[in-house]
Image (cartoon, helix red, strand yellow):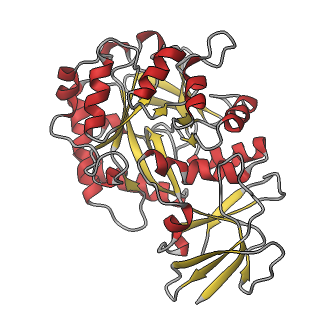
Amino acid sequence: MRWLSNVRLPRASPCSHSGQRWRIGLDGDDRVQQIEALAAGSAAAGDDWGGDWLSPMGVDLQINGGLGLAFTELSAADQPRLQQLLELLWRDGVEAICPTLVTCAVPPLRQALAVLRQARADHQPGRCRLLGAHLEGPFLAPARRGAHPQAHLCTPSLAALAERIDGFCGPADGPGGGGADAADIALVTLAPELEGAAAVIQALRDQGIVVSLGHSAANDSEAMAAYEAGVAMVTHAFNAMAGLGHRQPGPIAAAALRGDVALGLIADGVHVAPGMAVLLQRLAPGQVVLVSDALAPYGLAEGLHRWDERTLIVANGSCRLEDGTLAGVTLPLLEGARRLAGWSGRPEWAIAAATVLPRRVLGERRPLQELLVGRRLGDCLRWSADGEAGEGLHWRRAA
């Protein structure tokens, strides 16, 4: 057995001890077989990693497309380019995604779900895996719709839900069962304060589909009631919802106070100011989940691009409509982890937010050590930083 020594594992807990070192045992195929904690000051034999972190690859719960493809516009003819996009994501350190379908008409939504189902069945090594889709809409608050087209918003109802997803399945093993790989739909973002939303939330949960609060005008009481009903995440926190207020705490405060609701965060420094991103992670380090919110121009040059019938202006990694509405980014998921680590000085939290905690949202309950055992080292990430505070954090393949 070959050993790696002086390795750190990412943690996202207020009491996590970032200085803990580990020893990793690899078999002849370079698969992780053993993980042992090292005593302080130990000089155990093995390849010395110098305190670098080992993590699984990233999981992106909110990505809208790339290489010119918008997932809501997919057709069977797009399969070759979709596979190219999955190869790009793999190179960018992302193991799996929930392809996000923004608000659109029913026929293209159902067509996209069918195309994604086929692509999931055609998965090949060396490509990012397609998990169940993330439906962002159409049950959104009109006043908080952001870049979502008004024409396709819909009042929540079981009939409207069935029209969109009948024939497509949620995670086969239910919530916590790890069935997102086989699911057509893994996650749905909606505004839980809308009339009719409660029945839709229950129907989604009955199928094992994670429900997320987003594009919502919910106050803290309405949000707390939604969390009690099973809403388990907040979509792109601070965006398209109320922020933190000292008299009106809002849905983010309610989620942080509960302690078990994931807080999706776009860490580009534009959607959320760096200081507020750091504050959120300090409030709830085990709840912040990084998402890219990348749009179709991800992987392409900046400039003018098309988004449905609208023009998308891409500059400095940000995507805006012609009226200035912020629509998304073109930055890779792990760039968000790098930026957040630099702002916060807590690289272990930032790494976990992009690699470990997204898996928790989808039901993965194994501790990190068990999650790593059996993985090929080349399918894991090695993270290095220039200093203890996370300056210059960067990743590479662990092998």
Q: Position of residue 89 (x, y in %)?
A: 48, 54
Across and down, in percent, residue 269 comes to 69, 33
Q: Where's residue 239, x and y in %? A: 56, 23
- Residue at the left extreme, as displayed: 167
Q: How many marks?
A: 0
User: Residue 296, can we see it?
Assistant: yes
Q: Nearer the viewer, residue 239 or 248?
A: 248
Q: Is residue 6 left or right of residue 27?
A: right
Question: Relative to 341, does residue 234 appear above or below in the rendering?
Answer: above
Q: Nearer the viewer, residue 253 or 279?
A: 253
Name the residue rendered at 48%, 13% in the picture. Answer: 217
Judge whether residue 56 can be spotted in this image. Answer: no
Q: From what the image shows, is residue 240 above or below residue 267?
A: above
- Report the side of 82 relative to 49 (left or right): left
Residue closer to the observer: 388 or 249: 249
Q: Quadrant of residue 23?
A: bottom right
Q: Decide: is 143 above or below 389.
A: above
Q: Residue at x 57, y 16 (%)?
A: 242
- Image quadrant containing the C terminus: bottom right
Which of the image's four quarters has the N terminus? bottom right
> Residue 363 in the image: x percent, y percent?
41, 49
Residue at image coords 73%, 66%: 52
- Vertical position of residue 312 compared to residue 144: above or below: below
